Image: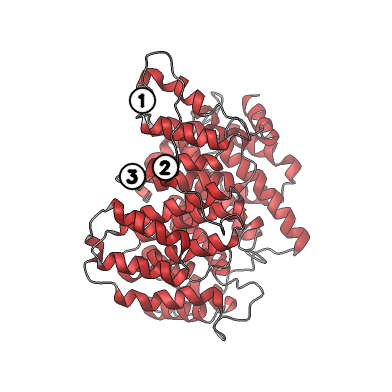
Amino acid sequence: MDRRDFLSAAGTVATLSLSSSLGRTAPADIYDLLGLLEETPRSQIMERVVARIRSELRYEDLLAALTLAAVRNVQPYPDVGFKYHAVMVLQAIHHTTLGVAPAERWLPVLWAVDNFKEEQAEELDASGWTMAARPSAPTPAPSPDRARSALAAALDNWDLEAADAAVVNYANVAEPREVFELLWQYGTRDFRGIGHKTITVQNAHRILTLLGWQHREPVLRSTVAALLNHYDDPNPATVALQEDAAWRQNTELRGEIPEGWLEGRLDSAASAEMLAALREGDTLETSRAVVGLLKDGISPASIWHALHAAGAELLMTDPGVVPLHAQTSSNSLHYAFRESKDMATQQLMLLQGAAFIPRFRAMSSLARGGVARLDELEPLPVETPAGIPTGTAAAGTDALDDVFSGGRGERSQVIGKALGYLEAGGAVQPIVDRVRHYLAETATNSHHYKFAEAVFENHAWSQRSPWRDRYLAAGFAYFNGPWNRSNPTMQEARELLQA
């Protein structure tokens, strides 16, 4: 979504309401709101933010202030994950907000406000960290080429202090597209953080596209810090480490990709071939399989279909937090592939996406004996009123009620019914709407939002894939539904908004 699209969408979001007193469009002082978010105790934050909502607060102003609060108060150390999800979840929160019913549209961002306060408190207890003052700008300002070179050198050297200053300097003399063309590459450089680095860059790009480039400095400083977190490893610039091996390998493999590779043909058999390699191959074998298919004239789209399907299979095999990142990270890499205008970067996104899947597979003890196969997933019949086909409008609510009727321990049945519903012609959007409703009602962690929105987007981007309905149905291995308990924090928010 570009800036124009967002302004159009924000016209809708700005009218979010749970009572007639909400939804006016008076401008807000973002930094006054930022102070409220940073300084108010968690026990009081919901009541105070809802009071601002009732006093004409715009949704986009709250999202902007929350973004600044998160990047200023939660650092991506010691992990690019855990508490740092307060930052990484924000673009998913926005997508859910746009998609839920009007009566629920304040709930996702209010959940994110409460989540920020929880993670801010954890940061204060663990380290006391807050973002340092902005690095001073050089005089005169460097040229864009010189500023880019300085940032690239700092990133190559894993030099956090130099990169902190360099990204500010570069962002102040370059176009947003130029800054992100560089960050896309470094976001996929290594597997530390199980894909969270590429998710961080995607989130930064989308949030700044939504809210405006004027918020760039703290967002980009936080992003660069995430990219340079090498955990307990020695400086990767000084020693060749296994975590960076795929990057080194795939940077070389790009040279084997033929001209015209973007113009290949869609081929479902090639997707199946790529998926077979992803089920068993190591990082070198899966990357070489990508190059081989591109040499054979296969479209990158067919490879992305296999990457998304492989992530879905891993989650079906081991429905936990780590395997779901195979889908959220492939979604972020695919997003970068779509946004980048640089062919070398696009190639790297494909190759690293293929290299990440074996790493996720290796992290799952359940997957080491083989993964569940999407092509063997059996659709189950869906209950509808007598004589009414599943895919017709008349069957709609009843068919969906049956899809969502499984209990907490019946996810395989729900997956089968979801596939049965889709293969019988059932509409996709009502499933998406229903999951988003349960997100607003029951979500308790960032993965609920991040995972669901990644799967929805993967499905939307795969319009001509025979796999798309299968990896949407497989999402029920982790989707929220009536099997999740209501979140008391959201119950409190709803009551405050309706008071």
| Numbered mark located on residue 470 in the image | 2
Q: Residue furthest front?
A: 369
Percent coordinates x, y for residue 385 in the rendering: 43, 14
Q: Which of the two residues, 309 or 259, is positioned nearer the viewer here?
A: 309
Mark 1 or 3 closer to N-term? 1
Q: Residue drawn 57% across and 29% down? A: 406
Mark 2 or 1 closer to N-term? 1
Amino acid under disc 1: Gly
Please, is residue 269 above or below residue 412 in the view? Answer: below
Label 1 sits on residue: 391
Label 3 sits on residue: 466
| Numbered mark located on residue 29 in the image | none
The CA span between labels 2 and 3 is: 8 Å
Percent coordinates x, y for residue 104 in the rendering: 54, 31
The quadrant of the picture occupied by the C terminus is: top right
Percent coordinates x, y for residue 185 in the rendering: 43, 70
Contact check, label 2 and label 1, Cβ < 8 Å: no
The CA span between labels 2 and 1 is: 16 Å
Please, is residue 387 above or below residue 497 in the view? Answer: above
Q: Which of the two residues, 336 or 103, is positioned nearer the viewer here?
A: 336
